[in-house]
Image (cartoon, rainbow, N blue to C red):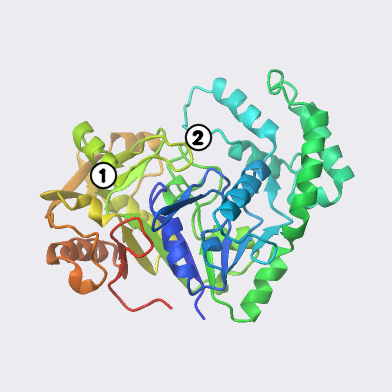
Amino acid sequence: MSNIVILGAQWGDESKGKLTDVFAADADVVARYQGGDNAGHTIVLGEKTFILHLIPSGILRPDTVNVIGNGVVINLETLFGEIDRLQAQGIEVSSDNLKISDRAHLILPYHKAVEQWEQMGSSTKIGTTSRGIGPTYSDKMNRHAGIRVGDLLEFDHFQKKLDYNLETKAEALQVSGIDRHGLLETYYGYAQRLTPYITDTVAFMHDALDAKKRILFEGAQGTMLDIDFGTYPYVTSSNCSAGAVCTGLGIGPKAIEQVLGVSKAYVTRVGGGPFPTEMEPDLDEKIREIGKEYGATTQRPRRCGWLDLVALRYATQINGFTGIVMTKLDVFDTLEDLQVCVAYRYKGKETTRFPSSLGVLEECEPVYETLPGWQQPLTEARTAADIPQRTKNYIAYVSDYLNVPIPIISVGPDREQIVQLGEPLW
């Protein structure tokens, strides 16, 4: 038995979905524990591309049960659209292989309206996906306002909570055009369709643990977008780090045996906020085009930067990585030299600590080491023997800096474009 967390080590978009899909081949359960449909996990299977926003990436493996835990916030319109698309592509989605926590909170249409209203009144342009994620988590913490999946099973109770929210949010909803009667009718239909999937997932997860099942815990977004440990306020509204596995699924920390951080060979981020290793415009554009760096959820262009080992070591400390999976190495195939940030310079002094202050981070300048590129194509590599020595040197440099092994790399978008460098994890 080995229960593995797979999560983003950077600002998201590191190919977590692909890695979860790869490991799910040997998993019994894949459980998502935080975030909402602001996630976009892309999985390429030959000629087919699947983009998943809520359903765990194990859904493409027929023998895997997928769990959406209590820490996730759920937009039912997105969820049912995702189920319909998967089924149209020949992927089975049923109550047998998808379990949804009765404790998970619901994103309602008014949450999007509230988010837009709040952004209009704010001087800080965070660059959210405008999907109502933050206001839903706010309502959850408010306690009076939160509506959970289980409330749909007691529809009179759901209606009372809905009325409370429409009344207390009236100012923000003045121009939203939200119709109470239509909303109730829509969600009554949703309740009928959702009921077979609704599960006490805490009990389900503990049954799986007792039965010695192999479990993957799938994270969304990335560590640097964590609400507590990321570049606040340019972050998401949930905890993206390993600690959220316990609170987002109702399991104890002893159930976690390995924590795999997923990191690109470079780094990207979407939206605003400081980004010390951001590339010069010409190279930024080149890497974006080679790596197809556009948001899976919003199609927004991602900002590209050199690998930031200060931030990556910080993520390693927070999550307790037992290993790192390095992805998109093939994007660097044509570059002669590669820059790696090994420290920051702030007011004339070098530091390897990631600052908590946004103001300090904005003034930090990267200190780079230059490593030689390999200038060979990697996309056909399937074994360690196929990897050029200069690529191995780049990987070893990162591993030594972090003092964490890098047992797996990815050299392309397809699930087959994976190279095992170390011992199998399962």
Can residue 277 be seen by looking at this rendering? Answer: no
Horizontal placement of 136 versus 290: left or right? right
Q: Tell us which disc is closer to us: 2 or 1.
A: 1
Q: Amino acid at mark 2?
A: Thr
- Image point (17%, 62%), residue name: 391
Q: x, y (%) of residue 301?
A: 36, 35
Residue receiving disc 2: 128
101 over 130 or under it: above or below: below
Mark found first going from the N terminus, 2 or 1: 2
Query: Does dot 1 land on a helix, a strand or a loop?
Result: helix
Residue 65 occupies quadrant: bottom right
Horizontal placement of 351 versus 106: left or right? left
Towards the viewer: 260 or 298 = 298
Residue receiving disc 1: 290
- Image point (69%, 52%), residue name: 104
Can residue 203 be seen by looking at this rendering? Answer: yes
Classify 10 Å Cα crowding around label 2: few (below 14), some (14-19), many (20 and above): many
Q: Amino acid at mark 1?
A: Ile
Towards the viewer: 242 or 376 = 376
**Residues at marks 2 and 1 touching, judged by CB atoms closer than 8 Å:** no
Q: x, y (%) of residue 420?
A: 30, 72
Q: x, y (%) of residue 179?
A: 77, 26
Classify 10 Å Cα crowding around label 1: few (below 14), some (14-19), many (20 and above): few
Q: CA distance from mark 2 to mark 1?
A: 25 Å
